[in-house]
Image (spheres, rainbow, N blue to C red):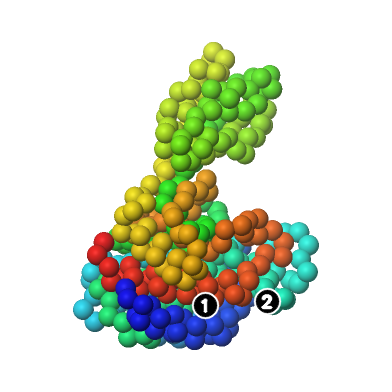
Amino acid sequence: MNKECASALLKQAQAQKQPLLTGLFEILSINSERGEAEAGAPYGPGPRKALEETMKLAESLGFSTETVLDQVGIAKYEPEGTEGKPYIGVVGHLDVVCAEGEWTTPPYEPAIRDNRIYARGALDNKGPVLSCLYALKAVRDSGMKLNRPVWIIFGTSEETGMEDIPAYLTVKEPPVAGFTPDCKYPVVYAERGRSVYELTFAAAAWCEAHPDEASLKLDIRDPEFGILQLRNRKQNGNTVTFAASYPPATDAECILAILEESLPEGAGTALVSDWKPVFFKKDGPLCASLQWAYETVTGLDGTPVTTTGGTYAKRMPNIVPFGPSFPGQKGIAHLPDEWMDVDDLMKNLEIYTLAIADLATREL
């Protein structure tokens, strides 16, 4: 994309500031914590209301919408000539973690203090995914010719198991390429795998003798990802459960085999779940497009990176994590007084505008 085209797109993005803040505050005002399932609301009335209101917001911006199995919403931009073609997908979520702890202002009464938006979901993930919706509006308003449709996809159970995306994929094809705005910058080309294990035996003495990865012979290293990490160990009577955040240098079955060697005779072992690593070529067209968008807006080094976290990229094929947190920003999303800086929100909007436009026009 040439500089003139990028500049025109950024002007359209900058014009979305006030509309984005207005729309975002509407959605932030909804308590979308998971609740008891009911008819038409598999994750409770809160996530369902957030989904309904977001679809209304997208329609007010001129997009067609669709709700899939009461779990996932889609805002679609399908310019003439792109109907039926493989789509670019941007996948975020409207559900939030519980707003526990002490808040300066109520978590579902969004407020701006010192140029920061305070509310549950401001950063994780309503602010970023709505910035993508308004980025798509900026692309549309620019009149730029696209080669592919673009769908902004809104999930409602990312924080509680990501059951929504597998349901979506039972009736919809995955995007040809895209991203999830629910991690960090620069573009993340690879995520670790994450597996959960359950061990059953007389556990107390064993746990004391095997406190870490090295004692279990699981100090597995990868030149790009670092060392395997064990997390969330819990003991309940004679049952021990824990998760392994593992690099591509191993896999869940190999980890299980190593664990079995450390266990006493007769112990029970089970692999409860396994989300495989996500891995893309750092110099492939998807990462190259997102790196270009990031570097163009920020002027920073956008060399693709890895993450130990887990995002929708583990559930939705062909997408990578991309934003919204900038280098040095950690430990904000799930705490009381969750916040997102207004300038950072706008910077995300600009990055996502260029990213969407470039992905929808470049050769993939």
| Residue positioned 45% across, 23% down in the render | 257
Outermost residue toward the left? 81
Where does residue 21 sit, x and y in percent of width and height?
58, 81
| Residue positioned 55% across, 56% down in the render | 159
Q: Nearer the viewer, residue 257 or 326?
A: 326
Mark 2 neighbour density, 10 Å: few (under 14) some (14–19) many (20 or more): few
| Residue positioned 57% across, 15% down in the render | 264
The image quadrant where one finds the N terminus is: bottom left
Numbered badge on residue 53: 1
Q: Nearer the viewer, residue 286 or 229?
A: 286
Mark 1 neighbour density, 10 Å: few (under 14) some (14–19) many (20 or more): some
| Residue positioned 76% across, 59% down in the render | 101
Where does residue 73 sit, x and y in percent of width and height?
43, 69
* Residue 221 located left or right of residue 78: right
Report whether residue 34 is seen: no
Distance Cα–Cα, label 1 vs label 2 = 26 Å
Numbered badge on residue 201: none
Q: Is residue 263 above or below residue 11?
A: above
Report whether residue 175 is seen: yes
Where does residue 104 sit, x and y in percent of width and height?
78, 69
Instruction: Return the residue at label 2.
Output: 115
Q: Nearer the viewer, mark 1 or mark 2?
A: 2
* Residue 302 located left or right of residue 33: left
